[in-house]
Image (cartoon, grey):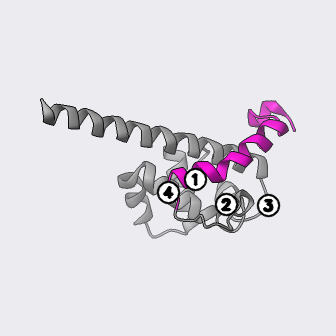
């Protein structure tokens, strides 16, 4: 595996894959059950994971894109492109297939990191508002 193309080496990917399930559970990802493993997220649940991630991170943007009368792959690709995460025609990146597996893993890790940061920011905002209300 080339670390230049993905930004991760294979042992780093392996370690991260072990923590994906835990992180997604902490983020209350609705796609996870006790039997779900990370390979399912990159496989048959990939499009649903992308939809959930994008609608969680940028609900207004995703709602606008989702209302467009185009195929789901185009909607997901456009949303990711508008967030600067892929090229405007990277349809293979969002489709459920085995192509671009390393790029999909990298995208999975990036989205999880963004979701975690988003959750932390929301928690901080709630704490600040709570403190202001008590003063």
- Nearer the observer: mark 4 or 3; the answer is 4
124 relative to 104 in the view: left or right:
left
**Label 2: which residue?**
41
Q: Which residue is nearer to you in this view: 67 or 28?
A: 28
Question: CB atoms at circles 3 and 1 under 8 Å apart?
Answer: no
Which badge, 2 or 4, comes first in the chain's sequence? 4
- Nearer the observer: mark 2 or 4; the answer is 4
Magenta stretch: give its range: 1-29
**Label 1: which residue?**
24
Question: CB atoms at circles 2 and 3 under 8 Å apart?
Answer: no
To which quarter of the image does residue 125 belong? top left
Question: CB atoms at circles 2 and 4 under 8 Å apart?
Answer: no
Neighbour tally class for label 4: few under 14, some 14-19, many 20 plus, Cα within 10 Å:
few
Q: Check if residue 114 falls in the magenta segment.
A: no
- Judged from the image, the secondary structure of the residue bearing numbered disc 2 is helix
Q: CA distance from mark 4 to mark 3?
A: 26 Å
Question: CB atoms at circles 1 and 4 under 8 Å apart?
Answer: no
Q: CA distance from mark 2 to mark 4?
A: 14 Å
Q: Residue at x 76, y 34 (%)?
A: 8
Res 28 label? 4
Q: CA distance from mark 2 to mark 1?
A: 10 Å
Q: Is residue 106 above or below residue 29?
A: above
Q: CA distance from mark 1 to mark 4?
A: 6 Å
Q: Residue at x 43, y 38 (%)?
A: 120
Res 98 label? 3
Which badge, 2 or 3, comes first in the chain's sequence? 2
Q: Which residue is nearer to you in this view: 56 or 80?
A: 56
| Image quadrant containing the C terminus | top left
Q: Which residue is nearer to you in this view: 115 or 103?
A: 115
Q: Is residue 96 above or below residue 125?
A: below
Which badge, 3 or 1, comes first in the chain's sequence? 1
């Amino acid at each position: 595996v080339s670390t230049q193309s993905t930004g991760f080496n294979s042992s780093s990917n392996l370690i991260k894959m072990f923590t994906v399930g835990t992180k997604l559970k902490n983020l209350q990802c609705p796609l996870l059950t006790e039997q779900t493993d990370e390979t399912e997220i990159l496989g048959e649940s990939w499009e649903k994971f992308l939809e959930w991630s994008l609608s969680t991170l940028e609900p207004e943007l995703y709602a606008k894109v989702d209302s467009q009368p185009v195929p789901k792959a185009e909607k997901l690709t456009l949303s990711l492109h508008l967030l600067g995460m892929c090229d405007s025609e990277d349809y293979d990146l969002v489709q459920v297939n085995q192509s671009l597996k390393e790029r999909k893993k990298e995208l999975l890790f990036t989205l999880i990191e963004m979701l975690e940061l988003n959750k932390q920011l929301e928690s901080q905002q709630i704490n600040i508002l709570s403190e202001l209300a008590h003063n």
